[in-house]
Image (tube, rainbow, N blue to C red):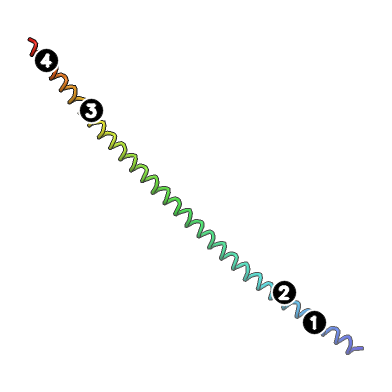
Amino acid sequence: MKKLILSIVVLALAIAFTSCREVEEKAEDAGTALEKAAGEAGDAIDGAANAAGEAVDDMANAAGEAVNKAGDALKDGAENAVDKAGDAVKDSADDATKKVKDLTKDN
């Protein structure tokens, strides 16, 4: 009877020990999986931050180009306006000269 009880106790301890070892291994596996997931999440955050930074840089470059194009358009418009004003003054002067010649011919 003592042997039977002792055998049952030894068997119970062996099962408990094996169970504890399995729990420990599963806990280690879970820890490893958690570390891997945290690393992947960190990589994803870094990637998103880099993408956001690049997007901001692209927007800044596009805004700079737009300002340059607007400046060029204003400059071209101003040059054209000066040219047109000069042409108008020249045409008016030519007309005035012609009228003065016409008036002096008649007199």
Tell me the tag on residue 13: 1
| Earlier-in-chain disc, 3 versus 4 | 3
- The amino acid on which the numbered mark 4 sits, given as a three-letter code, is Asp
> Which residue has dot 3 on it?
85
| Earlier-in-chain disc, 2 versus 1 | 1
- Of labels 1 and 4, the one closer to you: 4
- Of labels 3 and 4, the one closer to you: 4
> Which residue has dot 2 on it?
23
Q: Quadrant of the N terminus?
A: bottom right
- Of labels 2 and 1, the one closer to you: 2
Q: State the separation of the CA atoms marked 2 and 1.
A: 15 Å
Q: Contact, CB < 8 Å: mark 2 with mark 3?
A: no
Q: Contact, CB < 8 Å: mark 4 with mark 2?
A: no
Q: Nearer the viewer, residue 36 or 105?
A: 105
- Of labels 2 and 3, the one closer to you: 3
Tell me the tag on residue 102: 4
- The amino acid on which the numbered mark 2 sits, given as a three-letter code, is Val
Q: State the separation of the CA atoms marked 1 and 4.
A: 131 Å
Q: State the separation of the CA atoms marked 3 and 1.
A: 106 Å
| Earlier-in-chain disc, 1 versus 4 | 1
Element on which disc 3 rests: helix
- Of labels 4 and 2, the one closer to you: 4
Mark 4 Cα-neighbour bin, 10 Å: few <14, some 14–19, many ≥20: few
- The amino acid on which the numbered mark 3 sits, given as a three-letter code, is Ala
The answer to which quarter of the image holds residue 20 is bottom right
Q: Nearer the viewer, residue 53 or 106?
A: 106
- The amino acid on which the numbered mark 1 sits, given as a three-letter code, is Leu
Furthest residue toward bottom: 3
| Earlier-in-chain disc, 4 versus 2 | 2
The residue depicted at 31 percent of the width and 36 percent of the height is: 74
Element on which disc 2 rests: helix
Q: Quadrant of the C terminus?
A: top left
